[in-house]
Image (spheres, rainbow, N blue to C red):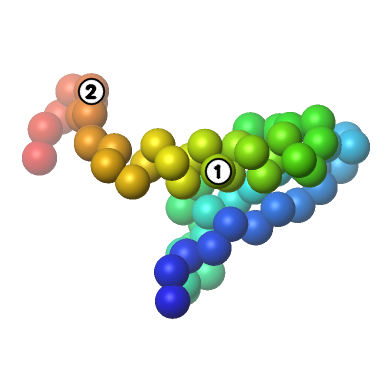
Amino acid sequence: MAGRFVISEDGQGGFRFALVANNGQTLAVGEGYPTKVACVNGIETVRRNAVDAVIEDQSVRKL
């Protein structure tokens, strides 16, 4: 089973999503969105853009 996107209300009338792994660990959290439709659109944007995403390491310490 793949991870899942969880939508929640943010307490200020908006919505956020979290990408959660199978083990329950939160991997990423989206920005706040004013509507649930906008939040779902944010999820779809992540899905489309992350498929072939590369890692860009801008840290000072390298592996």
**Mark number, residue 57:** none
Q: Give the crowd class for mark 1: few <14, some 14-19, many >=20 residues within 10 Å.
A: few
Q: Is residue 29 visible?
A: no
In the rendered structure, the answer to whether residue 28 lies left or right of residue 14 reads: left
The residue that mark 2 highlights is 58
> Considering the numbered disc 1 on the image, is that residue within a helix, a strand or a loop?
helix
Earlier residue among tags 1 and 2 = 1
Residue at 10% across / 40% down in the picture? 63
In the rendered structure, the answer to whether residue 51 lies left or right of residue 19 reads: left
The residue that mark 1 highlights is 44
Amino acid type, mark 2: Gln
The percent position of residue 21, horizontal first and vertical second, equals 46, 65
Residue at 22% across / 29% down in the picture? 56
Amino acid type, mark 1: Glu
The percent position of residue 54, horizontal first and vertical second, equals 23, 36
Q: Is residue 35 visible?
A: yes
Image quarter for residue 16?
A: top right
Q: Is residue 10 above or below residue 6?
A: above
Q: Is residue 18 above or below residue 12?
A: below
Image quarter for residue 33?
A: top right
Image quarter for residue 43?
A: top right
